[in-house]
Amino acid sequence: MMKRITAIILAVLMLSGCQLATEEKREDRLQDKLVGVFVTFEPLGLDFDIEAYLNDHPGVLSGGEVTLDLGEGMEYAQRLPVTVTEGDWLVPGHEGIGVGRYWNGECWTGFSGEGICELNSNIADSDEGAVIRVEGTVFFPDGSDVELCANPVYQTGEGEFYVIQGNSFHSHLEKDGSMSHSVKDEKTWTENGTETGYSAEFTTTVRAVTPAEQVALVWMSEDHRPLGREEYLPGQLPETLTPAEGAAYLIVEEISGDGTVRSLCQPGGEMLTVYYRGEQPWCLPETAQILWEE
């Protein structure tokens, strides 16, 4: 995404004394590897060292306006240190959920925070380099106005982590609607006469679901008579469900303030998935295995 920075913003930054870590060797930062994203629901509010960028690229200022590709200008972005907690990135002063895949010195390791669902991860490592592709989904209630910021997390050659300001994307999620955003980076270098590469891409998808406030399960016979009814609150669905004796199919009632949505489960359909909203703004899936008799 391109970002326009006017000469007025430049003046404000210079007057505010915004000094980022310009003493760092930017060529070293260009070799830092993308190892994850830290997803937030508002911008991190980090700055960009526009003064240093203009000093190094005097030809880009024309007519009082600069057109800047933040991907190419990553080394001028303010960064925040990041630590790895059990199952997520920890960024002091900011709340969010994260995904990470990185080399810890011995093997590839990674994690995804609560709220990142339907995770699909692939790492291909060879003599030519490493290729990382990670996809995850965050569920929100139908009709939500969502703002997400996919903030890139990098790893330095010393094994330290930091995050920079990422792009924001907005969406009004209609029923069953979705949108995706990817953060990617590619690098190549020559070591001992051999060219090596590193490519990473992290894709975050936002998808609308209808969260249930209560779930009712009605076991039905072949002649369509109810054999039993079970009711569960969000987060209390058991991991396995045993059909009532003689049950031929199951009616699932997802009850919310908007009404009741009914669906049918028959033998052969062994997994039941419903969604609920907890304390966070996103929704979580809840699954149960149906133990149909063979």
Image (spheres, helix red, strand yellow):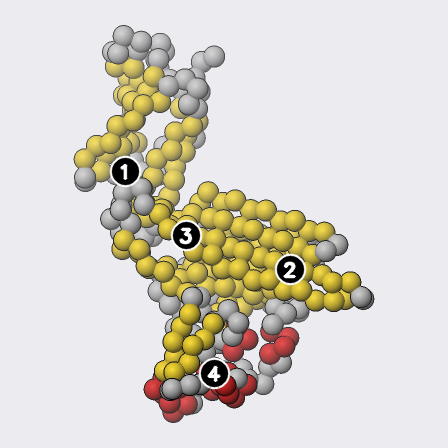
Residue 32 in the figure: left or right of residue 64: right
Q: Which residue is mark 4?
A: 60
Return the residue nearer the eye: 151 or 255.
151
Looking at marks 2 and 4 on the same chain, the residue that comes earlier in the sequence is marked by 4
Tell whether label 4 touches label 2 (CB within 8 Å).
no
* Residue 212 numbered mark, or none: 1
Mark 2 or 4: in front is 4
Residue 275 visible in image: yes
Question: Residue 218 in the image: x percent, y percent?
Answer: 28, 21
Looking at marks 1 and 3 on the same chain, the residue that comes earlier in the sequence is marked by 3
Mark 3 or 4: in front is 4
Looking at marks 2 and 3 on the same chain, the residue that comes earlier in the sequence is marked by 3
What amino acid is found at the position of numbered circle 4 in the picture?
Answer: Val
Local secondary structure at mark 1: loop
| Residue at (80% x, 66% y) in the render | 193
What amino acid is found at the position of numbered circle 1 in the picture?
Answer: Ala
Q: Residues within 10 Å of mark 3 (few under 14, many from 20)?
A: few
Marks 2 and 1, Cα distance to the nearest angstrom? 43 Å
Q: Which residue is mark 3?
A: 180
What amino acid is found at the position of numbered circle 3 in the picture?
Answer: Ser
Furthest-bottom residue in view? Answer: 15
Looking at marks 3 and 4 on the same chain, the residue that comes earlier in the sequence is marked by 4
Above/below status of 34 relative to 227: below
Return the residue nearer the eye: 141 or 68.
68
Q: Which residue is mark 2?
A: 198
Residue 164 in the figure: left or right of residue 174: right
